[in-house]
Image (cartoon, rainbow, N blue to C red):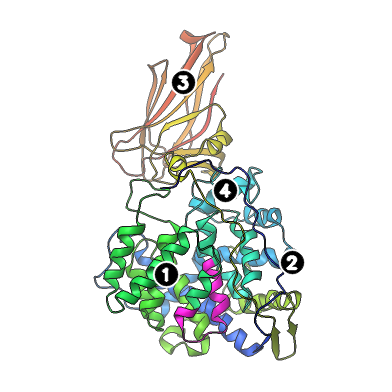
Amino acid sequence: MKHGMLRIAAVAIVFTCLAASAEPATTMRKSKYLDKCKGAWAGQMLGVCYGDYSEFKTLCKPNVGDIRPWKKEFIKGALGQDDCYVEMTFLKALEDHGLGITYEQAGKAFADSKYPLWHANRVGRDNVRAGIMPPLSGNPQHNVHADDIDFQIEADLFGILCPGMPQSCNQLCDVFGHIMNYGDGLYGGMFMAGMYCAAYFEDKDVAKVIQAGLDCIPKESDYHKCISDVIQWHRESPDDWVAAWNKIEQKWQDDVDCERGQPFNIDAKLNGAYVVMGLLYGNGDLLKTCEFAMRCGQDSDCNPSNAAGVLGCMKGYKKFTKDLTGGFKAIADKKFIFTEYSFNSLIPACQRITEQLIARDGGTVKKRKYLIARQVPKAPDSVERWDNQLEVLGKAIPQAELDRWNKGWKLLACGYDMDPGVHDEMFGRKNVLVIHPAGKTEAAVLETTIEVPSTPNPKLIVEAASHEEGNYLLKVLVNGQPLLQSDVDTKGQWTTLTADLAPFAGKKAVLRIENHATGWAYEAAFLSTVQVQ
């Protein structure tokens, strides 16, 4: 494993002149661009709906059982999928701010979103709302989920916008990906987006498209090494996907992720490996591609979405069979939730940005065709490495994040379930700390040292809530003495608990809060105000 000091400053990713190209300018008919753009979005939508019923239900084992057959009416579920609508926040930000959009503008556009988020996305958005702007909002110093899958499942957009222009694509990924991710978490997005850039000019050879995506990220990164392994293992076992899956599990399922000790794994490179499994073993068939990406398990709706999106871009929408396109007409003009975009309006919106990129980077936009100044894929010049990953992941909540809730508190123990951390808003309250027991018999523990005022009747005030479907036992101790014990079962409502601090008036005291499990179901404690009056 890697050791060393975490770099405090974000690593600058330097790009060479985008217009400089080792390849000749290439003509692309607008009709072909539009067909492939449409295929890319349709593929994403199809993939996420294909696998959504299986998401995180197969962990640390291959899914070799029966699967749900595809039905055209499933596609309507895409309108409510975060795999789609989060990307549209980024598209709208580019429409509003232009190609020169800054880290801060991109971050604030994301911070203004209203949809629920989890993992790296949630922490990145909360960081921006707290004034921690990208690229620091995605840095492990402030975001324990920096290697998670979040940007990887949202970066499709940037490849869709950049036909044959992977350097321009990486530039956009650098700005948007650092909102929530860093290092391998960022490179996962660059890899996915880079495949789309190549897919516009490659109709059949999936291996070439995968390699083009790899060429967009540093060879020194674990992400690159993981995907390279998958390519080799497929060569060794082209007719035995389980054999390749087992090798992935043995080498790359290392539990160095944001859910330590759990079979659940939302790590970008592991799930990226499953995307590539779908592309390689699917042999150019969209449903088979979705099937193999899903059968690998873990985030088994996001992975088919990435895989089918790339393949959909290669094929173009006109090559989709009727059993795949049958459900699109009914939803084509309906808006994705939290957006102003429909399937029909997405394509011209993307086209507008693409034409700006083509013109900016040395190409020409004509009436019926584009002259694209092709760019060779190029990895970032500097490599971001999360060197103290094990040290940071040893705590479910980084100290810098905990300080946003209430400075002076230390987290002594906490489990990884239910997205622990400081949430911008929960149950109508701002700046809420979420902690979860470390185990069925091990509490989550917070501790701080306080000065108890010498005023008459000093009190401790704790505002707490429980999940709608769970409860927990909250204990408060002062200098090791039990002060308060309450079964918190508020079903998403807030309750105020008070305790008498008179015996400690005028003294320093060690205040300890413990969250104990009761039935091991939705045991998270939600803490708003903890103060002495």
Question: For residue 306, which numbered disc appears in the image?
Answer: none
Indicate the amino acid at tag 4: Asn
Query: Crowdedness of circle 2 by 10 Å Cα count: few (<14), some, many (20+)?
Result: some
Residue identifier under label 1? 275
Is the residue under label 2 in contact with that under label 4 (CB below 8 Å)? no
Indicate the amino acid at tag 1: Val
**Magenta part of the protein: which range?**
191-208
Query: Crowdedness of circle 3 by 10 Å Cα count: few (<14), some, many (20+)?
Result: many
Indicate the amino acid at tag 3: Leu
Q: CA distance from mark 1 to mark 2?
A: 31 Å
Residue 271, by quadrant, is bottom left
In the image, is residue 205 part of the stretch drawn in magenta?
yes
| Residue 302 seen in this snapshot | yes
Question: For residue 98, which numbered disc appears in the image?
Answer: 2
Residue identifier under label 3? 511
Q: Nearer the viewer, mark 2 or mark 3?
A: 2
Indicate the amino acid at tag 2: Gly
Between residue 218 and residue 145, name the one nearer to us.
218
